[in-house]
Each structure stands twice: as C-alpha cells, then as structure tokens.
Image (cartoon, rainbow, N blue to C red):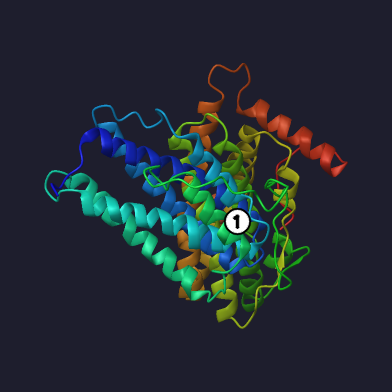
Amino acid sequence: MIKGIGIQETAERLRNYSYLGCRSIKILSGWFLRLENYEYKYKLAYHLYETSEHVSWYYSRLGEMRGGNAHASIRPELSEICEAVLSAPSDGTFLAGYYGVFQRKLIEAMKEDLEKIDASGNANEARLFTRVLNDLKIQQAWFDSLGMEWENLGWITYLKNFMGYIGGIHGHEERGERPLSPIDTPFERPNRILFDERIQVGPLQSYEQRQALDINEAVIEQFKVFFNEFFAAALVASVLYDASDGSYPWAMLADFSRHFWDEARHSEFGCVRLRELGHEPDRVNPILFDQSQGLPILHRIAYLTTGLEAYFMPRKSKRWQEYSKSGDKRSLLFADQDWSDEINHVRYGKRWTEYLLEGDHRDLNDILDEVKAHLSKVRGEPVTDISAPF
Ligand SMILES: [Fe+2]
Ligand SMILES: [Fe+2]
C-alpha cells in the first residue's frame, strides 16, 4: 500500500473532526449542568477545554490548506449522531455513550488515519493526530477508572447501531439500518445546575461576615466561596451550549471554553483546599446563575464579565496580600491563579460584548441596564447595582 493522503482527503477528515469537536462543546456543556457528581463535572469541564483546543488546531491547519474551508459540506448524519449522544436518558448512559461509544469511535478513526498517512508527506497531520490522540487516551483512562458496567446497556447497542448507520466518523464504512431511538424526549438544557445528595443549595456568608471572622475561620469560608464558583462555570456553560447552535465566531467559543474551564478549576480549588482544612464541600448558592437564565447570550456575558467579575475584582489583590502576610502558601497559590484568570475573563468580556454590539444602537451600559431590569423582575425588587450576596 502506498502511504499518504492528499489534501482533499485530509481536509475532509479535518472537517469531520472539527465539526464533531464543535458539537462536543455543546454535549459537554449541557451535561456539565445535568451530571450530578461534581467531581465528574470537573473532568467534563477539562475535557471540553481540551476539545476546544483540538478544534482550534484543526481549524488552523484547515486554514493553511488549499480548499480547506472548515464548514463546507458537513454530512448531516454527523449532527444526528451528536444529538443522539446528547440525548442520553441518564448520567450513566451519557458517560457510557460519550466516552465508551462516541469517543472510542473517534479514536479508532484517527488511529486508522494515522496508519494511512506518510510521516514526511503528511507530517502536519501526523503531529496533529498524535497530539489529539494523546489527550483522548487520558480522557479514556479516566472513563475506564470509573469502573462502570456499561457494555450491555440497551443505550450502547442503540448508539453503536447509529454509528453503523452513518458509516462511521468519515462515512466510509459499510452502513446498517437506522436504529429506532429508545427515548421520546430530546435533551433539554437544564436552567439550573444539578448535584448529587452531597451538595445542598443554601446561602453562604456575606463578604462582610467573612471579614469579621478570625483568620482560620475566614479561610474556610473563603474557600467555600471558591467552591461555589460552580455558579460562574454554569453560567458560561449555558453560554457555550446556546452559542453552539448560533452563528458565532469560533474564537468566541474558544475564549469561553477557556473561561468555563477556569471557573470549574476555581471551584476545584475550593474543593481541594477545604479538604486540606478538614472540611468536605457540602453547599452551593447558585442564585446568580439561576437569575441569569432567560437573558440573551450577550446579556449573560455582560452580566458575568463586566458586572459580577468586575464587582469581585477589588477583593482579589486584598486576599492575595492577606495570604501572603499570614504565610498561608497553599491558599496564596490558589488566590494568585484565580486573580490572574479573572483579569483574562474581564478581557474576554470586553472583547466579545464589543463584537456582539457592533452595528447595534446600544452600548454596554444599555445592556447592563437591561440586565438590571431583568434582575429587578426576577427578584421582585429594584436592582440598581450588580452585586453578589456572598
Ligand atoms: Fe472564577
Ligand atoms: Fe471568572
């Protein structure tokens, strides 16, 4: 067999992979909200970010190629398989379907591509596929580590048959019959964030209450607020999910994929530090996320980045100085990373609100006024400033 694949064939493969990557952003952000185990949510958030990096790599390679239009002639079947994976009826079937069927098929296709390509003639693809496969191998290892009994689930047979019906990732395999869906309801993005029985919804101490505590107690309460950054991750997840079906530039989804993972990491900082301090995370207050639902994408972005994140910002350097002064190096590490990330988030917010408002008669202040009017309606009292109860 002569090794190597030409530009046209390579472009077709990269188009398939980039499209599936984009749809995976929708699948993972939707299931981030719905999956109840919060440690699994952290993994999904990281996998979403990795997927967005892969899509950026595919697009950048396609951009260099003759005839590398990333969006030309996507097979409609690829959209159907992604909708099928998304519509899993439970947490277990979602994990088994996404990682056990969908991602494994993707890995199989990419490994086959890697076997066909020529190390020198297709050096770009060799490098790209090897890097992606390396990430996916680690994602698979995490799924395997869950030790789920999943191979015999009816849902798995359905998805495998669906993969057969579309002829595999590239549509080149022998095709079977279209299987009947075992469920009648499509996936609906939750407008609240779900947790298992370990996490209760309830109020957190206010900033002023925490300031009045002695330093040891204050650190614990501060890391409960870190853990609660689930609200911010959920808000960005809702933006990613909804924007996946719109015509937004990829660079915007890439920035918010990063923003999303950052917020999930900040919550994980809370989880890690609370455990070190002898406390198990047990509470969230998702009110800021809950009240953002119903707002358009532009308004949700403006509310979070130029409203809430700007509101929290003055606390960041103060907290950094407190930990630095008290010699609490572990807390300092987390506060340091968080502060740095937050500066980026405000930057993303500025960039994308400006972009989304291009050609509109309103400016950012008008949008924030509209957000306040929405919050006033939801809270049943006038909201004049964007602030947080914790
Ligand atoms: Fe954050
Ligand atoms: Fe943030």
Q: Position of residue 78 (x, y in %)?
A: 48, 41
Q: Is residue 307 above or below residue 109?
A: above
Q: Does residue 262 appear in the picture of this structure? A: no
Q: Residue at the spot x=42%, y=70% of the render?
A: 141
383 to the left or right of 122: right
Mark 1, secondary structure of its residue: helix
Q: Residue at the spot x=69%, y=56% of the render?
A: 193
Nearer the observer, 385 or 358:
358
Q: Residue at the spot x=71%, y=73% of the render?
A: 198
382 to the left or right of 113: right
Nearer the observer, 311 or 162:
162
| Residue situated furthest bottom in the rendering | 278
292 to the left or right of 321: right
Q: Exactly how many numbered labels are in the figure?
A: 1
- How crowded pointer 1 is (Cα within 10 Å; few <14, some 14-19, many 20+) is rated as many
Q: Position of residue 70 (x, y in %)?
A: 37, 32
Q: Is residue 143 above or below residue 72?
A: below
219 to the left or right of 13: right
Q: Does residue 195 appear in the picture of this structure? A: yes
The yes-or-no answer for disc 1 within 8 Å of ligand 1 is no
Residue type highlighted by circle 1? Phe
Provide the residue designation for mark 1: 32
Q: Position of residue 138 (x, y in %)?
A: 39, 66
Nearer the observer, 187 or 152:
152
* Quadrant of the image where one finds ligand 1: bottom right
Q: Position of residue 71 (x, y in %)?
A: 41, 30
Nearer the observer, 265 or 135:
135
